[in-house]
Image (tube, coloured by chain):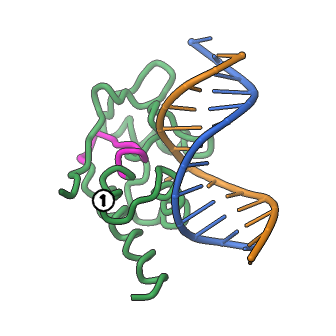
Chain colours: A green, B orange, C blue
Amino acid sequence: MTDKDRLDDYVEAVLALVDQVPRGRATTYGAIADALFDEYGGGPRQPAAVMARHAHGVTWWRIVRSDGTLPPHLADEARQAYLEEGTPLRSSGAVDLRAALWLPPVVD
DNA sequence: TACTTGACATTTT
DNA sequence: AAAAATGCCAAGT
């Protein structure tokens, strides 16, 4: 198993979790990092780095920061998706994690 | 090999 | 409440 294969594997794991997030809900980068920590370790920046390069074909808007907000360039498109899915939002336009947070299954 | 960068998180101003 | 500083880990260059 080469280093590249290992990274591709991590990418798949992240995208898989993203794909599992139920409609109208959301999860955080930290939660994903936690779920994958047992197998790959690393911190919350890794899932983020993965998404930055593989945001194609996945429901990336269901992944938000720990405070429910999202960087400026994404907030715009994400907002539309939230409105369509009926995702609980806060006054600031950020996702209301208290109601929408979905925790990925952690590997034992 | 060394330095920079990042769709983050947490703590302190 | 909002912004700045710190800590973090690995990929990219």
A4 w.r.t. A98: above or below: below
A47 w.r.t. C2: above or below: below
**The C terminus of chain A lies in which quarter of the figure?**
bottom left
Answer with left or right where residue A27 lies relative to residue C1: left
> Residue at coordinates 32% horizontally, 34% vertically from top-left?
A87
Residue C12: name its quadrant: bottom right
Q: Which residue is at the front of the view, A95 or A108? A: A108
* Spot occupied by residue C2 in the image (x, y as percentages of width and height): 65, 18
Q: Which residue is at the front of the view, C4 or A68? A: C4
* Spot occupied by residue C6 in the image (x, y as percentages of width and height): 67, 36
Answer with left or right where residue B10 lies relative to residue A58: right
Badge 1: how crowded within 10 Å, few (<14), some, or many (20+)?
few
Amino acid at circle 1: Asp
Q: Where are the magenta residues, as a range?
A: A22-32
> Residue at coordinates 38% horizontally, 54% vertically from top-left?
A59
Is residue A27 within the magenta segment?
A: yes
> Residue at coordinates 39% horizontally, 52% vertically from top-left?
A33
* Spot occupied by residue A57 in the image (x, y as percentages of width and height): 41, 65
Q: Tell me the element at label 1.
A: helix
> Residue at coordinates 42% horizontally, 22% vertically from top-left?
A90
Parent chain of label 1: A
* Spot occupied by residue A83 in the image (x, y as percentages of width and height): 38, 35
Answer with left or right where residue B6 lies relative to residue A11: right
Which residue bears the numbered disc 1?
A38
